[in-house]
Amino acid sequence: MNLENSIQTPVFRLIGEEADRLGLECYVIGGWVRDLLLHRPSKDIDIVVVGSGISLAEAVAKRLGKGAHLAVFKTYGTAQVKKGETELEFVGARRESYRSESRNPIVETGTLEEDQNRRDFTINALALCLNKNRYGELLDPFGGIADLEDCTIRTPLDPDITFSDDPLRMMRGIRFASQLGFCLAPETFMAIKRNCERINIITKERIADELNKIMLSRRPSVGWKLLDSTGLLPLVFPELAELKGVETKDGRGHKDVFLHTLQVLDNVASKSDYLWLRWAALLHDIGKPKSKQWEPGAGWTFRNHNYLGARMIPRIFKKMKLPQNEKMDYVIKLVDLHMRPINLIEDTVTDSAVRRLLFEAGDDIDDLMLLCNADITSKNEDKVRRYHQNYELVKQKMVELEEKDRIRNFQPPVRGEEIMQLLSLEPCSLVGELKSAIKDAILDGVIPNEYEPAKAYLMQLAKERGLI
Ligand code: CTP
């Protein structure tokens, strides 16, 4: 196959010319070729050189001239050239194997084919020649094109060897299946099952990278289900594996929280690309196993699971090397609040309860409502429609109250400084109490969210407490 017409990018011609001048064979390889054939956007360009990747990189950087930046990594035999948006990675073709308990490879110079077969999957081992007389020639010794057509993830070598060389590839295989909507070849799947324990030698950071990519795929449930069926799930995320299964008592079961969670996650993913909203969906019921109880009369209950789940998140994020910052706080908040809107759908719901939710959710209220809508996974269509309609009513009420009271980004109309000045107080806990009392009066609708009424309310409180 020749793909000359698909690679008219000038930089490829230039690399080919420089390689010819140096008498080196060179190829664009890996993810870039795969994505070209799948018509997906791809940024990083990997160039493999039979010989020294560094010499070609140096020559290319020189030709690209002003604005080109060269970085050489001698120990690894690699080099990077950057210019504007273009990022090129150069490496010499190598054969490589890893000692069984270490990630440090023994690297030796190799042929193109040796370089291709040490790669993770056939679809990532495709190479396109850039030398002038073979420009665009596709080298596919392992049937990568056939696997792209069949939507199959398969290792070029015996999968036990490929995965033992780098166990992260088990996660990568599942991630590609999830991202591309592909299936794992049966022997690849079985090898992950056999080798899953080896994931323990991989750093949590690299695992988190793959999990985030699974989370950002169109249907993240595909990845999580494969993690489960291959045996990786309890090793990379034990708390999620805990959600699996159904217990029955007196003929009454509860839903399988794992499957429900994945459906909620896919529902959210169909509406939002925001990674942390997707994590909130994955974690929204994480507290259920801890709170599960059988209560005679009531059946299975999961009281306070939102609160217990929210409390588990800092430890989970820390252990999994997910960010310990405002993104985590956002996930905690959504998990904590995810049961609140459902309690607001009765007729008798008070304005005060809606204001309090607006106050607590702040600008994340729309994401919270999206999560709550996604959480309705009943098979009873009537019930689903009723819930969605009720949520619409809650949303309307929120809009009305927000217009009137502007609670979403609440700032106290009378500040602490002013309270101290008006009542001649030194800084003390009483100032905080008075501030909270004003906030509560606004949220409860006793006074409007305005300066004068808030000040009058403060003075009345002060009088009642004998402060003035
Ligand atoms: N590769 C590999 N084993 C790994 C990582 C990478 O064999 N554990 C090879 C694959 O041939 C891959 C190439 O190195 O195509 C580049 O790796 P990388 O940039 O991480 O992945 P891409 O395939 O480009 O995909 P993505 O950018 O989506 O991660």
Image: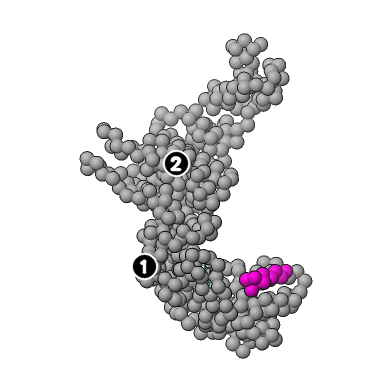
Question: Badge 2 is on which residue?
Answer: 309
Q: Is residue 16 above or below residue 364?
A: below
Under mark 2, the amino acid is: Gly
SS at mark 1 in the image: helix
Disc 1 Cβ-to-ligand 1 distance below 8 Å = no
Residue drawn 36% across and 45% down?
384
Q: Which mark is residue 60?
A: none
Residue drawn 65% across and 21% down?
428
Question: Where are the magenta residues, as a range?
Answer: 69-78
Please identify the quadrant where the C terminus is shown.
Answer: top right
User: Magenta span has 74?
Assistant: yes
Under mark 1, the amino acid is: Met
Give the percent coordinates (x, y) of residue 226: 40, 60
User: Magenta span has 292?
Assistant: no
Q: Which callout, 1 or 2, points at the residue further toward the start of the chain?
A: 1
**Label 2 crowd (10 A; few <14 / some 14-19 / many >=20):** many
SS at mark 2 in the image: helix
Q: Which mark is residue 190?
A: 1
